[in-house]
Amino acid sequence: MIALSVLDLSPVSTAITGAQALRNSLDLAKHCDALGYTRYWCAEHHNLPSIASSAPDIMIGQIAAITKRMRIGSGGVMLPNHAPLMVAERFKVLEALFPDRIDLGLGRAPGTDPATSYALRRRQGISDEDDFLDRFAELMALENRQFPAGHPFANVRAMPAEVKLPPIFLLGSSDYSARLAAQIGAAFSFANHFATFPAAEAMSLYRDNFKPSPAHAKPYAILGTAVVCAASDKEADYLAKTVDLNLVRRNRGEYLPLAAPEEAAAYSFSPAEQSAVARNRAKMAVGSPETVKAKLDELIASTHADEVMITTMLHDHEARKNSYALIAGAFGLVAA
């Protein structure tokens, strides 16, 4: 049986505040822990009214404290926004408090717009170039004490020093990310729910180019994908209209709280918008448990994924919980 996991962005809808969205994440995490999901990852996004998840390390600690079985991690920490030492120390603290239950997922993008990215990084000596590899190398040098004698950081230790960093996953949505994860010998999580690059090709590039590392002797690939599951195909299609309208608005640069399906159903989509929705729906798994399982089985077979990480962005919290419960049942997860 393939492992199933959860990617949570703490969605904000027109019915709730951002604070309630974070509390809903705690409730969903307890729910999914009891259902038998393997991991629960929290995203990092900034300045988006539709997403409350801006501080994954804080949420990871809160969720790990109220769950028992799942691994809890970041999906991900956007490394361009943070000093590597800060990332190392926060995740060592989490690992110390919750041994062998924490994952460190790292992203290459800032997770926001350019102005907000500048506000996050303006004290860090910003470069227009992609400095992810430099930051990653610094993170690893801090962890393994690889700075040479005389280097300013030679005596800097991330505390608590005796605690190792949690397992590292590289997040991505492109061929470059797949090759990079393979090059550095990291586990890889591919974001199929918003990628324009084919998932099967990305997974193949990752596996074919993988170089073993001290952390990972062999490749490990997670497929992230969007799912809406309900009792019937018709009901799931109706609930997913929230996703449709959110996509159209996002394409226009409008990051509004998630609309109710009633509002989305009443929206008049232009032909271009209908095409965009159809392309997005083709990547999603929407329907009854049987329909969703068939679509996910297809994806698993084509990508040879080791694990599937599901993200579900719905207006109604109870509908979101029900979606994860139905998927767990369809795949035969072992409940607590």
Image (spheres, rainbow, N blue to C red):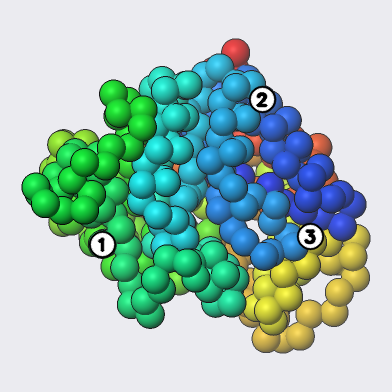
Name the residue furthest top. Answer: 336
Residue 237 seen in the figure: no
Q: From the top left corner, tell me how far across and down residue 327 is, in percent.
A: 61, 35
Within 10 Å of disc 1 (Cα), the crowding (few <14, some 14-19, many 20+) is few
Among numbered discs 2 and 1, the one appearing first in the sequence: 2
Q: Pointer 1: what residue?
A: 134
Residue located 42% across and 23% down the image = 96
Marks 2 and 1, Cα distance to the nearest angstrom?
37 Å
Q: From the top left corner, tell me how far across and down residue 320 is, in percent.
A: 73, 41
Q: Which mark is residue 30?
A: 2
Q: Is residue 96 left or right of residue 281?
A: left
Within 10 Å of disc 2 (Cα), the crowding (few <14, some 14-19, many 20+) is some
Camera-near label (2 vs 1) is 1
Q: Which mark is residue 258?
A: 3
Q: Is residue 288 left or right of residue 97?
A: right
Q: From the top left corner, tell me how far across and down residue 155 is, in percent.
A: 21, 41
Quadrant for the N terminus in the image: top left
Name the residue furthest left. Answer: 149
Name the residue furthest bottom. Answer: 271
Name the residue type under label 1.
Asp
Marks 2 and 3, Cα distance to the nearest angstrom?
23 Å
Quarter assignment of residue 232: top right
In this view, the residue in front, 267 or 148, is 148
Q: Is residue 278 left or right of residue 220?
A: right
Residue located 69% across and 32% down the image = 26
Residue located 62% across and 61% down the image = 46
In this view, the residue in front, 106 or 293, is 106
Name the residue type under label 3.
Leu
Mark 3 and mark 2 in contact (Cβ < 8 Å)? no
* Mark 3 secondary-structure assignment: loop
Q: From the top left corner, tell me how far across and down residue 70 is, in percent.
A: 51, 25
